[in-house]
Amino acid sequence: MKKNFLYKSIKNEWQKFHSKRNNKKKIKLHEPTFGAEEIFNFTKQLITTNVTMGKQVESFEKKICDKFGFRYAVSSNSGSSANLLMISALMSNLYPKRLKKNDEIIVPALAWSTSIFPLTQYGLKPVFVDCDIKTMNIDIDQVKKAISKKTKGILTIPIYGNPCEMKELTKICKKKELILLEDTCESMGAKYNNKFLGAFGLASSFSFYFSHHITCLEGGVTVTNDYELAEIMKIIRSHGWIRNLNEKKKWTKDYPKIDPNFLFVNEGYNLRLTEPQARMGMTQIKKLDIFIKKRRNNAHNLMNLMKEFNDFFIYQHEKKKSFHTWFGFTIIIKNLKVINRDKLCKFLNKNGVETRVIVSGNFVSQPVVKTFKHRVVGNLTNASKIMTNGFSIGIHQNLGNNQIKYIYDVFKKYLKRENLL
């Protein structure tokens, strides 16, 4: 990179601002993955005034495909939009194997809101099942029990970058002729049996939100190996028109009197990523492996320290065939009569260790669930326990060994204060 005046100015401002913010006793849930290089590339693209979706977005999508081995990538303005594109395309009349209203999709109860909402917004029926308490992922036995004549698919949501049991899930889908969908927004770079998550299902989503493994400030992408599905997602992403398709002739020959730049063939939205964001994303994706390595090292180091408190807490378990990318570090209190979660979290936050709930908890407990059709299989005991007993802390790439040790020290201080050690 040519170190011109603009770059040097940005770098100086970045260092000046962040030198004041460095505090080894402040453990944020998330820290920026970007720096002066990303801001420079973003600004350079902005200066060209070519800012709406174009060649940079196409290049970014290609880099995603090359990195993870996907055939097609359709970027969007958020991970939530990536989910929306995935479901809306599957429900489109243009898709030969389309889903239909009232078809059932099995989902984990431990879920994010906009993993579920596209299903209900398009008239599909989510069927909620429990999760495993250690991995926090969808319970395979409960999935088997949930299958009915109306079941058409399974949506996996690997929690915090921890892969689901993909071998079993793909086996179930093949046997029962179901589609497999993956919401991998928290799991970029995660692998099962050395295969990237997102490559198992018919379609999968990723997020480039600020707190995720890499960022475009906001942004998302839906990936698939199905050409027709990818083309339909391109239509839906941009107003329902054909302008961004690889093959326009099959439409233009039937409507010769309509300007092909304004030929609308499906209901659509405006979910486009911008060119400066794509430039930023291309810089970020080169750094992903380094970020993941740091997250994994931090998680393993903290896990080794926190083993001392195994009598009180459950930590997320990484299985042998899994490659966990640690979006955060989750903690479940075994007994609320011994440790009060809110009291502990208040102490952690007061001492600079930020906390938050895990995903959105047992989603069936959320009041919005009363507004749409759904089915529940089993008691959802584990999802409920994670909601009431669980929380997460940061384990991101900007933490060093001293900060990991500080997290452990704060936990130990609290447990000693409560006469538990």
Image (tube, grey):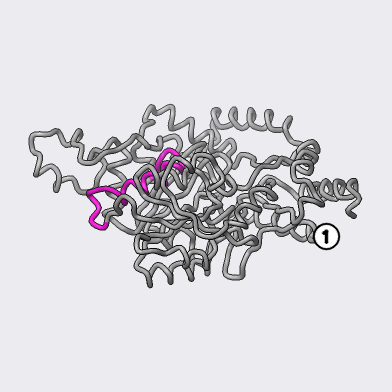
Percent x, y for residue 370?
A: 48, 42
Residue 212 placement, left or right of 100: right
List the residue tagged with mark 1. 308
Q: Secondary structure at mark 1?
A: helix
Q: Is residue 87 magenta?
A: yes
Q: Residue at x 20, y 33 (%)?
A: 262
**Identity of the amino acid at label 1?**
Glu
Residue 146 placement, left or right of 298: left
Percent x, y for residue 366?
A: 55, 42
Q: Is residue 197 magenta?
A: no
Q: Residue at x 33, y 46 (%)?
A: 88
Question: How many numbered circles are shown?
Answer: 1
Residue stretch rendered in magenta on the structure: 75-97
Q: Is residue 199 above or below residue 259?
A: below
Q: Residue at x 57, y 58 (%)?
A: 379
Percent x, y for residue 165?
A: 53, 66
Q: Is residue 168 above or below residue 284?
A: below
The C terminus lies in which quarter of the figure? bottom right
Percent x, y for residue 301?
A: 74, 58
Q: Can residue 67 be seen?
A: no
Q: Residue at x 53, y 62 (%)?
A: 164
Name the residue nearer the viewer: 55 or 241: 241
Name the residue nearer the viewer: 178 or 394: 178
Name the residue nearer the viewer: 179 or 17: 179
Name the residue nearer the viewer: 48 or 270: 270
Local packing at callout 1 (Cα closer than 10 Å; few below 14, some 14-19, many 20+) is few
Q: Can residue 3 be seen?
A: yes
